[in-house]
Image: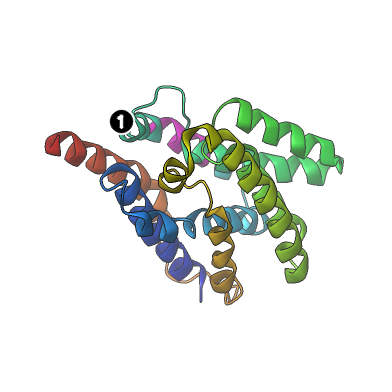
Amino acid sequence: MNATFLKILAIIFMLIDHIGAFLFPKILVFRLIGRLAFPIFAFFIAEGYRKTSDLTSYFGRLFAFALISQLPFSMATESKTYLNIFFTLALGLYAIYIYDKRNDLRLVYLIAALAQYANTDYGFFGVVLIFIFHKYRDNFKGVVKWFFILTIAFQIMIDVNLASLGFKEMLTHAGFYQFLWMGSLVFLKRYNGEKGRGLKYLFYLFYPLHLAIIAIIRNYLR
């Protein structure tokens, strides 16, 4: 599987997830499938860092689309304080850059903590996952090990935060199935290192557009 194929697959998983989250929140299967999306995007941030010829432009592009996407993201989530995934991806990119420059793991955790404090999508755990893909890019067993450990920590945080809602509400709000995002490794293991067709801006454009459309549809159906 080349990069383009995997990114399109991640977009499909993300679309299914967001349709479930914002239009059909009681249909659990949409959210289950959606768990597969983010790790693929996280992987390609690490891969993009390794292959880019202009890191400044890469970071600037992520940050620019973070700003562009925030309004449709806020419309979809109905939250003014929750920041979209591009902020997480940009911080993840910066985390692996600063780690390579300073060789200081504490800086990675500091940036991840900033993501959590800023309330970005996937927060601390999203940034750390990007770092795991970078750190263990040539060691698949290392990826699996640390991905699993991260997932346990993530699941505990989710369960603790949602415990007051009760078991039924936890099911609705992804309170027990974050482990399913590790299923993305089945696809990433088959990555052949090839770029594929140049659809560079597909995800960048699709993300804010599909959120805006979903928000409009939901408001129409109310």
The foreground one among 149 and 204 is 149
Q: Quadrant of the C terminus?
A: top left
Task: Inspect the magenta stretch and tell me whether residue 27 lies in it.
Answer: no
Assign the magenta stretch its main secondary structure. helix
Q: Residue at x 51, y 35 (%)?
A: 63
State whether residue 90 appears in this view: no
Task: Inspect the magenta stretch and tell me whether residue 65 lies in it.
Answer: yes
Give the number of marks. Answer: 1
Q: Position of residue 146 (x, y in %)?
A: 75, 57
Q: Residue at x 42, y 45 (%)?
A: 168
The foreground one among 43 and 177 is 177
Residue for badge 1? 75
**Position of residue 61 in the picture relative to residue 128 (left or right):** left
Vertical position of residue 113 compared to residue 55: above or below: above
Q: Position of residue 138 (x, y in %)?
A: 76, 68
Span highlighted in magenta in the image: 62-68
Residue extending farthest to the top is 80
State whether residue 192 appears in this view: yes
For residue 11, what is the image quadrant? bottom left
Number of residues whose C-alpha sits closer than 10 Å to that of mark 1, classed few (under 14), some (14–19) or many (20 or more): some
Q: Residue at x 83, y 42 (%)?
A: 105
Q: Position of residue 19 (x, y in %)?
A: 30, 50
